[in-house]
Image: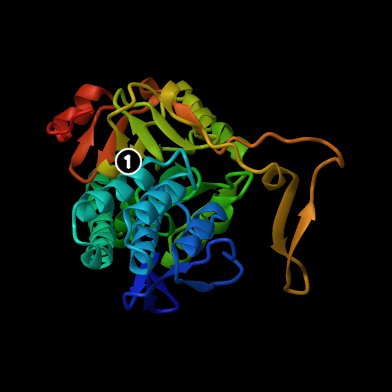
Amino acid sequence: MKIAGRHYRSVWPIGEDAFGIIDQTRLPHEFVTLTLRSEHDAAHAIRAMQTRGAPLIGAVAAYGLALALRDDPSDENFTYTHDMLAETRPTAINLRWALKRVADVVRNQPRDKRASLAWKEAAAIADEDAAMCESIGRHGLAIIRELAVQKKRRLNILTHCNAGWLATVDWGTALAPIYMAHDEGIPLHVWVDETRPRNQGAALTAFELGGHGVAHTIIADNAGGHYMQAGEVDMCIVGTDRVTANGDVANKIGTYLKALAARDNGVPFYVALPSSTIDWSLKSGSDIPIEERSADEVLKMTGRTPNGTLATIEIAAPGSPAANPGFDVTPARLVTGFITERGTCVATEEGLRSLFPAQNN
């Protein structure tokens, strides 16, 4: 996507000794890029959510693992770094998927070739993610086209968290069809959930959509059901950090409530995902580990002050504790369908295997 006329991916190589990311903790107020030069830089960026989004952190971790092998290609260092990076975000399966791809490439290879092989595989993971997201966009565009013909008016689409190009290498998952529909001239408007507690919707999704010229409105997380009841939401589309074999979906906390409201009001609820997000080893969403994040994310908020500086302030009653699960699980029964790089399907194991028949547990 473009920032000030320049095309950016969300991760890019800098020679073979470093790679760049966008510091998403500084958005939307400041656009800052970071240069990561080690596996520890990569791990910190993922933990601190300077880089985030299930597909993107997989690519970032792959580059981080390659840098570790540049400095020490031993089996011991590889195992240590692999496990260290895998633990940075436990819910998103793309992270472990990408690390496994690098592991498969370098396993049993001479030590002097491991770093180069790993770097090439990380670049391939990034390129493939961008291509998969573009394909997701085309398949989702077909759904939006059909809905636009039915409604014969501007479409209102609700999304939660950020599943755009900032969450992937390029294009995005849930936002890719929206960008393509907008570029095709289909009239649409996006309700952007603020997505507490980190406000990825208000900060990141709104930043993306505004930069692309897509009409949108930021709403409080609890307002989505109201707009559905009022007939002002034509479809919901979200991303996901992990989909289990039966079609259950783990996504940013609050997604489950939107799916419940959508079902109660007859609003289609779609989940957009690349195949790297499917975890065939888990039978249902109850098996997904849910990341518990810092209470400070709930008790404090960062924003721009009137004098233009960024500040973090306390917003809760002093002394009150806070719980902060990063994700919830939406049962497959509440999902209208999946949008993948290979097409669309119903949210069942049979539906997923109709698109990905060669996958095994």
Front one among 355 and 236: 355
Horizontal and vertical percent position of residue 306: 77, 70
Specify the color scheme. Answer: rainbow
Front one among 319 and 271: 319
Q: Is residue 137 shown to the viewer in this render?
A: no
Residue pushed farthest left? 358
Above or below — where is 198 with respect to 12? Answer: above
Q: Which residue is mark 1?
A: 277
Q: Image point 44% across, 27% down: which residue? A: 330
Front one among 47 and 219: 47
Horizontal and vertical percent position of residue 23: 53, 66
Q: Image point 46% across, 49% down: which residue? A: 84
Above or below — where is 161 with respect to 278? Answer: below
Residue pushed farthest right? 318
Q: Is residue 361 left or right of residue 291?
A: left
Q: Image point 22% across, 30% down: which residue? A: 352
